[in-house]
């Protein structure tokens, strides 16, 4: 059966009996990502890259760095001092204080005061992959900062700029806000259902292995359910793989010029581009990916899709070439296919333990990343 939305944001709709992409009765419905938490051994180096990437520093203590965008709201990123560089987990915003109570009651967790910048209250959980997930409410929002000017563009017969020139400033692209985080997991279906059932998120697009569609999707782009209010195409994306944890996080900037000029600034500072510039298919964002000094991947993006709750999931085959409408080919670094001891360890572990990775699934993923 073809979806009514098949020709709107995906060439294919669901087949009968496939995953509906939402829960019938979720515990709560989160409003957005609040922030991401990391640990770093060198906070000074982390702050230097963050400023080059375009974050503002909201606060700094001897052990914690709080990074923010220009929009009002909570900090985007919390970096705590630790023995090594690692992703700790995401924090999501609850819609109401009562949601924390409801969530704690349903999961057996506790509601406690959040002794951090902005205060508020928090429920700490673990998703089926073992990743820490926080749900927060009542944090004091940070005030707005000056925005990066959006350039006035001439469109053929509709000029907006006369007797003037374009000269984007050679400066960092100012991060406006946190957009999304992408996670890898060996327990894809179980983890996906947890986010839909527990946090009330809904799927915008599914990807599947072209010759294994009957085994279910292998990637989901998941948004917050705000009813009739438009939400980012994805606040969370998850894909099946031999690893577990962080893949990348994405931060909105003003426009395509900010993406491009911000990339030139990062390159001038000696930082490493992973992939870009291009335009995605699922989500439509203009993208540019970079590595921080600890090799964690981060994305500048602009012009992403917004969906309300009426739009059903699209379905598309998973492939490297299907990740972008235009731009350079996806790199092996971005795809995570560079041979390494860590990748080999993950593959061996995944094949030995009980999860959704088996040899046909692994070979199918490898084929898709070469397609």
Image (cartoon, grey):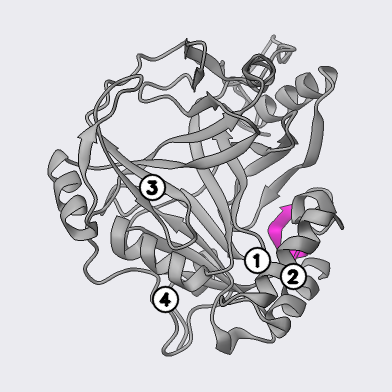
CA gap, disc 3 and disc 1:
27 Å
In this figure, which residue is indicated by the disc labeled 1? 241
Q: Residue placed at 22% from the left, 35% from the top? A: 112
Instruction: Estimate how packed mark 1 is, as few (under 14), some (14 to 19) or many (20 or more) residues with alpha carbons within 10 Å.
Output: many
Q: Residue placed at 56% from the left, 16% from the top? A: 148
Which of pointers 3 and 1 lies earlier in the amino acid sequence?
A: 3
Instruction: Estimate how packed mark 3 is, as few (under 14), some (14 to 19) or many (20 or more) residues with alpha carbons within 10 Å.
Output: some
In this figure, which residue is indicated by the disc labeled 2? 348
Instruction: Estimate how packed mark 2 is, as few (under 14), some (14 to 19) or many (20 or more) residues with alpha carbons within 10 Å.
Output: few
In this figure, which residue is indicated by the disc labeled 4? 4
Viewer can see residue 331: no
Residue 321 is inside the magenta segment: yes
CA gap, disc 1 and disc 2:
12 Å
Would residue 360 be found to the left or right of residue 147 on screen?
right
Which of pointers 2 and 4 lies earlier in the amino acid sequence?
A: 4
Instruction: Estimate how packed mark 4 is, as few (under 14), some (14 to 19) or many (20 or more) residues with alpha carbons within 10 Å.
Output: few
Which of pointers 4 and 1 lies earlier in the amino acid sequence?
A: 4
Write down the region rendered in magenta: 320-326
CA gap, disc 4 and disc 3:
20 Å
Is 262 situated above or below 311?
Answer: above
């Amino acid at each position: 059966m073809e979806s009514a939305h098949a020709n709107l944001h995906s060439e294919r709709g669901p087949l009968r009996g496939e995953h509906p992409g939402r829960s019938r009765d979720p515990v709560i419905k989160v409003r957005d990502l609040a922030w991401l938490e990391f640990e770093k051994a060198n906070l000074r180096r982390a702050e230097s890259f963050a400023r080059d990437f375009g974050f503002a520093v909201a606060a700094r203590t001897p052990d914690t760095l709080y990074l923010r965008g220009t929009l009002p709201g909570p900090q985007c990123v919390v970096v705590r001092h630790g023995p090594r560089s690692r992703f700790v987990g995401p924090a999501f915003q609850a819609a109401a204080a009562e949601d924390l109570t409801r969530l704690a009651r349903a999961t057996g967790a506790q509601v406690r005061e959040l002794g951090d910048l902005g205060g508020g209250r928090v429920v700490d959980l673990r998703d089926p992959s073992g990743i820490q997930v926080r749900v927060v409410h009542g944090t004091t929002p940070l005030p707005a900062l000056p925005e990066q000017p959006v350039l006035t563009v001439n469109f053929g017969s509709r000029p907006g700029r006369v007797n003037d020139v374009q000269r984007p400033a050679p400066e960092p692209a100012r991060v406006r806000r946190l957009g999304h985080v992408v996670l890898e997991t060996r327990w894809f279906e179980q983890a996906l259902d947890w986010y839909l059932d527990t946090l009330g998120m809904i799927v915008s697009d599914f990807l599947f292995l072209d010759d294994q569609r009957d085994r279910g999707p292998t990637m989901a782009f998941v948004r917050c359910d705000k009813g009739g209010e438009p939400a980012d195409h994805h606040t969370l994306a998850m894909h099946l793989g031999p690893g577990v944890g962080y893949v990348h996080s994405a931060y909105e900037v003003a426009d395509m010029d900010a993406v491009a000029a911000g990339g030139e600034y990062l390159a001038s500072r000696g930082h490493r581009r992973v992939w870009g510039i291009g335009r995605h298919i699922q989500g439509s964002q203009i993208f540019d990916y970079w590595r921080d000094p600890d090799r964690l991947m981060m994305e500048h993006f602009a012009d992403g899709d917004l969906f309300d709750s009426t739009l059903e999931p699209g379905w598309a085959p998973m492939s490297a070439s299907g990740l972008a409408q235009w731009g350079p080919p996806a790199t092996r670094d971005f795809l995570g296919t560079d041979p390494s001891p860590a990748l080999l360890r993950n593959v061996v572990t995944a094949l030995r333990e009980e999860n959704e990775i088996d040899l046909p699934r692994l070979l199918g993923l490898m084929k898709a990343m070469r397609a």
